[in-house]
Amino acid sequence: MRHFLDFEKPIAELEGKIEELRRTSDAGGIDVAEEVARMRDKAQALLKTTYAKLSPWQKTLVARHPDRPKCLDYIRAHIEEWTPLAGDRAFADDAAVVGGLGRFRGRAVAVLGTEKGSDTESRVLHNFGMARPEGYRKARRIIELASRFGLPILSFVDTAGAFPGIEAEARGQAEAIARSIEACLEAPVPFVATIIGEGGSGGAIALAAADRILMLEHSVYSVISPEGCASILWRDAAQAATAAEALKLTAEDLRRLNLVDAVVPEPMGGAHRDPQASLAAVGDRVWDSLEPLLALDGATLRARRREKFLEMGRNSVV
Amino acid sequence: MNWISEWALPKIKTLFGAPREVPENLWHKCPACEQMIFHRDLERNLHVCTHCGHHMRVGARTRMDYTLDEGWQRIELPKAPQDPLRFRDQRRYVERLREAQAKAGQEDAVVVAHGSIEGNRVVAAAFEFSFLGGSMGAGVGEALVTAARLAVLQDAPLIVFTASGGARMQEGAISLMQMPRTVIATRMVKEAGLPFIVVLCDPTTGGVTASFAMLGDIQIAEPGAMIGFAGARVIEQTVREKLPEGFQRAEYLLEHGILDLVVKRGEMRATLARLIGLLRTPERVVAPPPAEPVAEPLPALPAPEGPAVPA
Ligand SMILES: [Zn+2]
């Protein structure tokens, strides 16, 4: 079943009517092609105007859309010889973080990401994309493996944030994230990170301190969720839309602040309406970002990455 | 204020003459045991409760006074962008920031100093929790990067005393980017072969713990300090369980292998001096070097340059 967001209701209603019309025509043998085409044009136009002016909060909802392509969809679409690797070698394997080796357009790479899952079962399996310390330690291990063998790293980030749990704290959630950020910054190999949905705070930057950072058009990247920010600063979680606006968390905002390198356009109506187009667009942009980095040696990459982050935000104004 | 001030204050006034400070500051109530402590006793005891040993929060400059040898110097910090997002919640962030700056007499939540501890030259950075909850935005990130650069320049260990509620939400993703920025700062110090020592003070949470503050060569905490990544309330709401006794306290972290040491404030100077000595002086010097001031002037950072940002 297709999920519609609240603000998509008028579009959903139109699409529902089109569906109904076709069903009645099938049953009664009446030709409604013209009427269907007219309504479809109307639906498309509505979709276009709606998505052309999404508010930051609406974008947040699109970024969290259950039908939006997830990390594993990007891996399936682009990584050949995909070989997932498991475990942090100390405590457990955390399925919220996906990592492994494969080939991207023929070149051996290491791939990392946070996976939210795409149905109830897989969402539970991947803990809704919220990693525990083991996940960040697995990421660090794979980054170090890639570093040792000179493999470029690709990451696909989609997480509400690190998992807030008792055991996660006891096993050093903060340290695990810090070490993962450190590993990203230290890797002497090309590193391209893509925010494909939600870039939730420390849990996201842990896999995204990269040479090139891409964001999908309707993805968000923020230091705190709009709900969390609203409940702290407005003392009212219902002010999430206002907080989303204030946080400047859209791809466009992040690009303007020079915190990400490029925005990957999404198909009309969002990545969830045409996952194939979205997968293809990301693949191309990741390759375009990666290719020039392949010529650089490890020391140069690391030095430039450091410089990039040290300069970040120093001259940013909205 | 309460019974003790009414009863005891007049007597103290006659003993010491009219107090220069406002009377509210003469007596402090320990937030842990709720006993009253006379301010001089509290200061003499480094703001540790004389009744129960509770370590009270202290400001950044007081922290320097308590830890560094006399004569430490505050470093002027590069100007960071002020309110890059033009953030506004119920109030404008720029107003909150200006108010905090005026109250604290400093630009942001971190003070950086150079000085010495028992004669060992150090660069120290300390968080001021009363400055917007010690939250980390561009100003704090800039302070830590500057402290690291200075430590490298002066061939001195870097010691950071943390106290922070985490990221500064009002700076959005720019505050998030201070996590990698401060991690880079720790790398600079370590690559120069210098010790990076973190002293986690009450409270240290969120993006600060998940970046430079967990990357010390030595991880120390003050007794009872609240240290964690996620907030206790968020965890409770997520897992719907009661949190264990002492959860996210320094002793809990020590038990779980996250810290090296829990050190009382009164023993902090000696502990830091000993650690620096052990890490940096492989052979014990028979006669301790005289604690004279260093003859040659220390290298200094070039005058800080602000980014091309309208303040
Ligand atoms: Zn007490």
Image (spheres, rainbow, N blue to C red):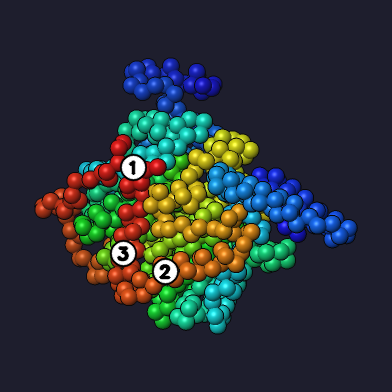
Rendering coords of residue A150 (x, y %): 39, 79
Residue for point 57% across, 73% down: A77
Number of marks in the image?
3
- Mark 2, other Cα within 10 Å: few <14 / some 14–19 / many ≥20: few
Of labels 2 and 3, earlier in sequence is 2
Q: Label 1 is placed on what type of residue?
A: Pro
Rendering coords of residue B34 (x, y %): 55, 34
Residue for point 39% across, 72% down: A291
How far apart are labels 3 and 1 at the CA level?
22 Å
| Residue tagged 2 | A288
| Residue tagged 3 | A304
B12 w.r.t. B73: above or below: above
| Residue tagged 1 | B81
Q: Label 3 near label 2: C-beta < 8 Å?
A: no
The image quadrant of residue A303 is: bottom left
- Mark 1, other Cα within 10 Å: few <14 / some 14–19 / many ≥20: many
Horizontal side, residue A240 vs residue B81: left or right: right
Q: Label 2 is placed on what type of residue?
A: Asp
Rendering coords of residue A56 (x, y %): 54, 45
